[in-house]
Amino acid sequence: MPDYRFKTTAQFEAVAQHLSSYHGISSALASKRLHALKAFQGLLGDQNVIFDFTGGVHIEVEDDLEYLGTLTTGGAKEHA
């Protein structure tokens, strides 16, 4: 994975824990949003994506990251 100026991970669990701790977004809600975002973008459910710790979701394209969307849209109040 290329080196970027912001912290990234491919581990959903790490981002889900961060979003829960710092944004009040449950893992279940983050997962629901991730599946909806992948479907909207035409990606398969098991297709690998890269997360940043603000909730951004990216896909690697030719040694760069393409932004797909965020897991924080809608805040913490929406139910999973």
Image (cartoon, rainbow, N blue to C red):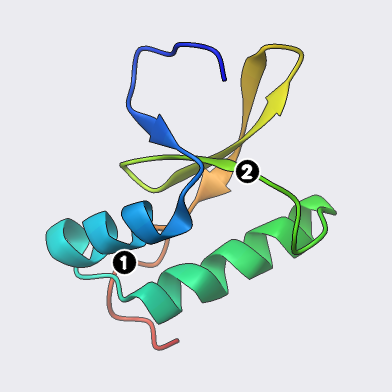
Q: Where does the C terminus fall, quadrant-wise? A: bottom left
Q: Identify the residue at horizontal 66%, vertical 68% (top origin).
A: 36
Q: Residue tagged by mark 1?
A: 75
Q: Between tags 1 and 2, which lies in front? A: 2
Q: Identify the residue at horizontal 51%, vertical 42% (top origin).
A: 10
Query: In terms of sequence position, does the residue under pointer 1 or pointer 2 come before the other?
Result: 2
Secondary structure type for disc 2: loop
Q: Where does the N terminus fall, quadrant-wise? A: top right
Q: Nearer the viewer, residue 10 or 56?
A: 10
Callout 1 amino acid = Gly
Q: Quadrant of residue 44?
A: bottom right
Residue that protrudes farthest toward the bottom in the picture: 79
Residue 22: mark: none
Q: Nearer the viewer, residue 72 or 2?
A: 2
Q: Position of residue 21 (x, y in %)?
A: 15, 63
Q: Label 2 crowding class (10 Å Cα cut-off): few <14, some 14-19, many 20+? A: many
Q: Is residue 33 above or below residue 3?
A: below
Q: Position of residue 56 (x, y in %)?
A: 45, 42
- 15 vs 2, left or right, is left
Q: Residue tagged by mark 2?
A: 49
- 74 vs 59, left or right, is left
Secondary structure type for disc 1: loop
Q: Position of residue 15 (x, y in %)?
A: 35, 53
Q: Identify the residue at horizontal 32%, vertical 41% (top origin).
A: 53
Q: Label 1 crowding class (10 Å Cα cut-off): few <14, some 14-19, many 20+? A: few
Callout 2 amino acid = Val
Q: Position of residue 23 (x, y in %)?
A: 20, 61
